[in-house]
Image (spheres, rainbow, N blue to C red):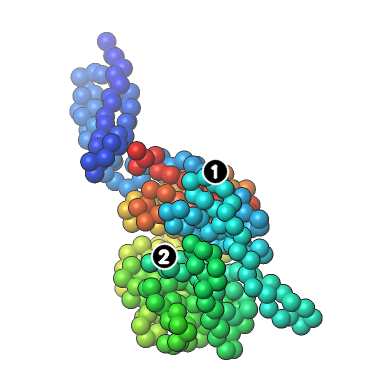
Amino acid sequence: MWKPVVLKLSWNRDCKSVEWFFNAVIVCHPICRRIREGLAVMILLGMVLPGWGAEWKLQREFRAEHMVIETVHNAQRVFAGTRVSGIDVFSVSSEKLLSRIRLPQYSGVFSKLRASLFSLDLSGDGRFLAVASNHGKVLFYNPETLELARTLEFPGIDSLTAIRFVDDESFIAGTLGGEVLLAEIDGKVRYRHPVEYDAVNRLALSPDRSRFAVATNASVIRVFETSGGDLLRELKGHKDAVYDLIFVEEHTLLSCGKDRRLLAWDLESGAVRELYYSDSYIHALAFSSVQGTIVFPADNHQLALMSWPRGEVFQTLSGHKAFVHSLRFSTAGTELWSGGNDSMVRLWSNESNLN
């Protein structure tokens, strides 16, 4: 007689108390034995592949004053950059609002205007929170005291729209006029190059920091050598503005944009592969090399988690009610921060890595 049996497997990874349980109901019959054995092997193999057993769930929520443009975080605090109000600073553990950093005012045609935020980043050593603003200045805040530590201004630049630290002493920035520059935190500009006639949306550095890629409102992505600013490659495949991009390996780049596509680029050959086509614009990307996971906003403002390099969506996260503009994994890859037009910052955790 045929008899259903439940196959239950557990696995411990990296000497942590992490168990992934897989239940499979198999019909036991002599002709099914090899099928049952093969399935067990497939499940075990699946456990060591990215995405398997990695269930992500919402852990905390933080409400900002306005729409969230970009977020950064350290172990104690999350900094939510908003276009209008500045930076809302929250305690990670208590979810409480600790402070609001109001950006400085500047002289407009008829009155004083408050600067607007376009991008922010934390230095690797944790000394500076850098803000790219619409009045052509980079503002450096102390992440602990929240005081303005220094201000850099660049002649001829009206708005800075993207910023990323190269190391603890230097950064790259993009402008509304389509330029990129490499500068030191003391104000010395190493180079300043035109990229495009349109605004720079995002910048991405390669894992070894030797190259960076530029996303603009034009459809072409350009990759530059970091130290000297030499143009290395132009990538043509998007059909409209590119909103975000990120390196997943030294020679592989992911990009997304207004044409609703998520693309993967081989930087050695220039070959491109479409990974996903969405019902709406894709504004943000993040990648965890630890998890081998890509995350991006998919249909109905859900976050899609995709295994790399397989390119398969293995989970979606619901919660945001509007476009998501910011996605960042923690260094360990076990936490994901998201923020968007619904004024919410959300912290998601991978349950398989929780104690």
Residue 271: percent from left, percent from top = 37, 69
Residue 9: percent from left, percent from top = 26, 29
Residue 41: percent from left, percent from top = 22, 35
For residue 88, above or below residue 30: below
For residue 259, above or below residue 30: below
The answer to whether residue 279 of the structure is visible from this angle is: no
Viewer-nearest residue: 78 or 251? 78
Of labels 1 and 2, the one closer to you: 2
- Location of mark 2 (residue): 126
State the separation of the CA atoms marked 1 and 2: 31 Å
Packing grade of label 1 (10 A; few <14, some 14-19, many >=20) is few
Q: Residue at x 59, y 57 (%)?
A: 99
Q: Which of the 4 image quadrants contains residue 37?
A: top left
Q: Amino acid at mark 1?
A: Ser
Label 1: which secondary element: loop
- Location of mark 1 (residue): 318
Q: Residue at x 34, y 38 (%)?
A: 355
Q: Residue at x 54, y 43 (%)?
A: 318
